[in-house]
Image (cartoon, rainbow, N blue to C red):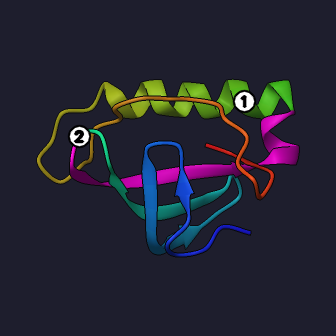
Amino acid sequence: MISAGEQLGRYKIRSAIGRGGMGEVWLADDIELERLIALKILPKDLANDAERMRRFVQEAKSASALNHPNISTRRCTSSRNSSSGHQT
């Protein structure tokens, strides 16, 4: 389980934003870029499912193609095991 204050790579978790069928979204600080971000995290069992990962990457690509002031921009997609067994 992810918790506030935990660091996942370059991201420091602040608080939960929401949860859905594909994973959890957290408010986090990007330590390298010194900016506040929304970080979507997939549980390990979903991240290990090739079809789910394909859908997740397609969702990220679709979101990154949008350009609107009320829509956040996808900056990166990475896969990394955290100590809690989640993928970022």
Q: Which residue is mark 1?
A: 53
Q: Residue 45: give x, y in percent of width and height.
A: 88, 46
In-front residue for pair 63/41: 41
Question: Which residue is rendered at x = 64% and y = 63% of the image?
Answer: 20
Question: Which residue is rendered at x = 42% and y = 29% of the image?
Answer: 76
Q: Residue 32: give x, y in percent of width and height.
A: 29, 39
Task: Specify which label sits upstream in the sequence, 2 or 1.
Answer: 2
Judge the density around disc 2: few (<14), some (14-19), many (≥20) Cα neighbours within 10 Å. few
Q: Is residue 65 left or right of residue 20?
A: left
Q: Is residue 87 left or right of residue 68?
A: right
Q: Is residue 26 left or right of residue 33?
A: right
In-front residue for pair 23/34: 34
Displayed quadrant of residue 54: top right
Q: CA distance from mark 2 to mark 1?
A: 26 Å
Q: Residue 33: give x, y in percent of width and height.
A: 23, 40
Q: Amino acid at mark 1?
A: Met
Image depth: mark 2 or mark 1 in front = 2
In-front residue for pair 85/25: 85
Q: Is residue 88 above or below residue 5?
A: above
Q: Is residue 9 above or below residue 67?
A: below
Q: Amino acid at mark 2?
A: Leu
Q: Which residues are magenta?
A: 33-48
Question: Which residue is rendered at x = 44% and y = 50% of the image?
Answer: 11
Is label 2 in a helix, a strand or a loop?
A: loop
Q: Which residue is mark 2?
A: 33
